[in-house]
Amino acid sequence: MDDEQKWSNISSDIADVAKKIKSRIDEEDLVEDLKDTFKTTIDNTSQLINNIIKTVESTVTDEDIKKETKEIVNNINSELKTLLTETKNKISDNLNIDSFLEEE
């Protein structure tokens, strides 16, 4: 193999490694974007639930209705927390599996 061919192969290998590095960085950026979006969604949902509770407390005068409404909102909140925890675990498990498979 002549020197020109060796340099061509080295150049090609370097280009391949650069592409893999860029792809990995893009994937990590995508994961970070998804995490940020997920966190923002959770924060917004939490704020909405708190606003609903405050609105109920300040506008509803009947104590029974107020109590039942707050229970319903708290049940919704609890279900959302459970759903978010399950989703977080699934995402985390998938990311760990993907990382493990890539390392093999």
Image (cartoon, grey):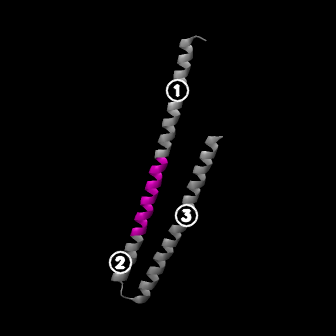
Residue 31 in the image: state x and y as whole percent. 49, 49
Q: Tag 2's secondary structure?
A: helix
Q: Is residue 12 above or below residue 66?
A: above
Write the residue at 35% across / 78% down.
Answer: 55
Q: Nearer the viewer, residue 80 or 14?
A: 14
Q: Quadrant of residue 58?
A: bottom left
Q: Which residue is mark 1?
A: 14
Number of other residues with Cα within 10 Å of mark 3, as a class: few under 14, some 14 to 19, many 20 or more: few
Residue, disc 3: 85
**Residue at horizontal 53%, vertical 70%?**
79
Magenta segment boundaries in residue numbering: 30-47
Kindly identify which numbered label has been placed on residue 103.
Answer: none
- For the stretch drawn in magenta, the main secondary structure is helix
Q: Which residue is mark 2?
A: 55
Q: Which of pointers 1 and 2 lies earlier in the amino acid sequence?
A: 1
| Amino acid type, residue under disc 2 in the picture | Thr
Q: Choose the circle earlier in sequence order: 2 or 3.
A: 2
